[in-house]
Amino acid sequence: MRCADGVYRAGRPPIVAGLLRERCVQNEIGLALSPVMQLSERRAGLVSSPHTGAIWQSTTQGAADLHGTLPGGRALELEIKHPRARVHYQPGQVDWLTRCARLGGVAITARHLRDVLEALELEGYTVETAPSAVLPSGIVVVGLHSPRPCQYLDQLRSGA
């Protein structure tokens, strides 16, 4: 469901056999989308150097769990939530996703792979899937086509 701030938020939690953790959902989404795009993980929190002992914040507070670039050049920000738990946002997460959507990216809060695919289809992307015996959802994305071609690539091809 797309909210007024432009962020797609997952509806009711799906009924699943057994307990899935956020990490399992994150891994499934990453694997299912891997044939068509590269997603990178952000790990929030404090990091310390084993050599110097220096401590720093590993990423911007509120940054989404996964990020990547969609065909056509749009940013994709995915905030993954536990399939059965009440959705609780950490400080800054709503602001991060809202800012991404306002800047033309696609921001999605997902509990399952189907939340991501539904949001991409609502954005006009054509999603092609194939059966998968490995992934819990039973599908893998084999094609993802942009509703509008990347103008920058068209300019490069034309030599302008």
Image (cartoon, rainbow, N blue to C red):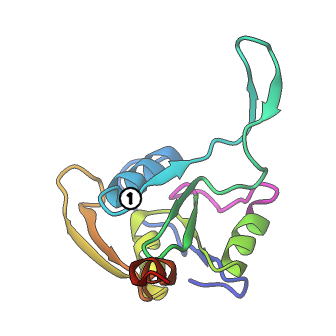
Magenta segment, which residues?
Answer: 81-93
Residue 36 percent coordinates (x, y) = 33, 63
Q: Residue visible at 73% across and 83% down?
A: 5
User: Considering the image in quadrants, where does the N terminus appear?
Assistant: bottom right
How many labels were placed on the picture? Answer: 1
On screen, residue 146 above or below 143: below
Question: Which residue is at a point 67% across and 77% down the rendered structure image?
Answer: 101
**Under tag 1, what secondary structure?**
loop
Res 63 quadrant in image: bottom right
The kind of residue on which mark 1 rests is Val
Front-lying residue, 156 or 148: 156
Mark 1 surroundings: few (<14), some (14-19) or many (≥20) residues within 10 A: few
- Give the x, y percent position of residue 15: 41, 64
**Residue 31 forms part of the magenta stretch:** no
Magenta span contains residue 88: yes
Residue under the point 44% across and 88% down: 148
Q: Left of 72 or right of it: where is 31?
A: left
Say which of 137 and 84 sits in front: 137
Could you say which quadrant of the image residue 59 lies in? Answer: top right
Is 2 situated left or right of 27 in this image?
Answer: right
| Magenta stretch: helix, strand or loop mostly | loop
Residue under numbered circle 1: 16
* Residue 70 image position (x, y, % from top left): 47, 70
Q: Is residue 135 above or below residue 107?
A: above
Residue extending farthest to the top is 51
Residue sitting at 51 percent across and 73 percent down?
73
Q: Position of residue 29 (x, y in %)?
A: 41, 57
